[in-house]
Amino acid sequence: MRSIFKIAFRNMTRYKRRTILTSLLIILGVTMVVLFSGLAGSVKSMMIGLITDSNLGHLQIHKRGYVSSIDTLPLNLNMNAKGYDNAAAALERTAGVESFAPRLKLGAVLSNFVESTNVRLTAVDPAKEPLVCPGLASRLVDAPGATGPLLEPGQIIIPQKVANGIGIKPGDTVVLVATNRDGSVNGMQFTVSRLIEDIMGPSGKDAYMHIDDARSLLRTEKGEVSEIVLRLTPDADLKHVAKQIENALGEFKNKQDKPAFEVHSWADLSPFANIANMIDLLIITVKIVMIAIVLISVLNVMLMSVFERIREIGTIAAMGTPPVKILALFVAEGFCLGLLGTATGILLGVAGLLGIKASHVTFSFGRMDNLLLRPDINLTELAIIAAMVLAASALAALQPAWKASRMEPVDALGHV
């Protein structure tokens, strides 16, 4: 086998121009795939991290039917205190749950006594919310690294674009007017503590307030919540933990004898999940194009090699070389072409990713600006790309190699 690869490498050096041109095609394909996979994968991972760390968490628990009506923020589908306690007790016993926090969601009219606008609000527990969404503080416009509680009672955090639209700044007094479950209207004054950047997805443009203030504004029962947000441990499998939680909550039934709670992952709640799937599909498409380039390039060069070396094939066959070794010789030559192109392409692709990372390139996505592009080197992805190219190279060389191994020595020696 070692001698076969030595002969294959020697044959590659005999036809330098053809080898270089074929290798350049493979190098170009591999380099583009490595760059595209690295950049697209890093954007996908960053956006998922941004959404889960600063907004949705990894999992959420709602009362049955809430998510199907979430656009209207139905107050009649909130959990009562007993429901929250039952769910919290189940979460305490579930392995893989790092932390969880209650939220109360509502819609209201926001006024600065001059102008008013509709606003969605997420009412949070300031002590628990940073544990499930540690990236929330980084979205604060005036104090991205601030310490201390996220909110005090009587304070509200306003989305930056809403504040700019009606001329609100930190320290201003505003009024929130909300309709409670029975249809009565209530209003309360609040102080704008900070502004917050918008992000993509549900709740990405919500204002934030203290959960106790929200209960007072809506005149709800103590302990009532709309959802429970969960953060999982780094090593936890999201689907497995979600199944565990569903099983643990399955014992609680509503009046229709159906499960009282529903468990949803961030992908169930965010439209970015569809974009993430499209990114995966694009990466697969680019890989298929790369394989096509490799197959056509290697097949072409190996066919030319066989036709140019018919007399040589006849000579080594007449000397007693078995057909299987002739086949292995040409397959090894195609494999070496793929190996040369793969190694060089991966090195160039990795160098390009490191260069982009060192350049601190920023980009915009949706309504989010100045996002830093930080491509990571995924060794598993590189190994998959290398395996695909090498397999395609060997496969492309198989048909010409089979043709060469089936030649009759007499016919091959007489070929002109």
Image (spheres, rainbow, N blue to C red):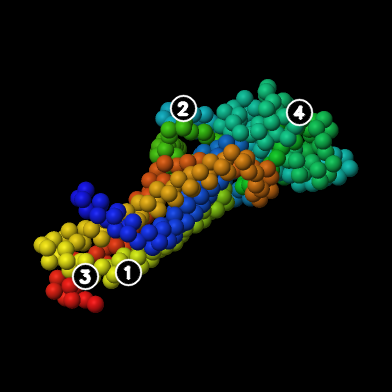
* Quarter of the image that includes the C terminus: bottom left
Q: Is the residue 192 above or below the residue 352 in the image?
A: above
Q: Residue 305 sits in which quadrant?
A: bottom left
Identify the disc placed on residue 269: none
Which residue carries the number 2 mark?
92
Secondary element at image label 2 = helix
Place of residue 117 in the rendered image (x, y in percent of width and height, measured from the top left)? 79, 46
Q: Going 53% across and 31% down the picture, which residue do you hit?
A: 100
41 or 87: nearer the viewer: 41
Q: Residue 26 sits in which quadrant?
A: bottom left
Classify mark 3: residues with Cα within 10 Å, few (<14), some (14-19) or many (20+).
Answer: some
Q: Are marks 1 and 2 in contact (CB under 8 Å)?
A: no
Q: How many marks?
A: 4
Q: CA distance from mark 4 to mark 2?
A: 31 Å
Q: Which sits earlier in the primary sequence, circle 3 or circle 2?
A: 2
Q: Nearer the viewer, mark 3 or mark 1?
A: 3
Q: Is residue 196 left or right of residue 77?
A: right
Q: CA distance from mark 3 to mark 2?
A: 77 Å
Place of residue 317 in the rendered image (x, y in percent of width and height, measured from the top left)? 14, 65
Asked whether residue 45 is in view, the answer is: no
82 or 120: nearer the viewer: 120
**Residue type at tag 3:** Arg
Q: Which sits earlier in the primary sequence, circle 1 or circle 4?
A: 4
254 or 305: nearer the viewer: 305
Place of residue 380 in the rendered image (x, y in percent of width and height, measured from the top left)? 40, 43
**Residue type at tag 1:** Met
Secondary element at image label 3 = helix
Identify the disc placed on residue 311: 3
Identify the disc placed on residue 304: 1
Q: CA distance from mark 3 to mark 4?
A: 92 Å
* Residue that protrudes farthest toward the right in the picture: 114
Q: CA distance from mark 3 to mark 1?
A: 13 Å
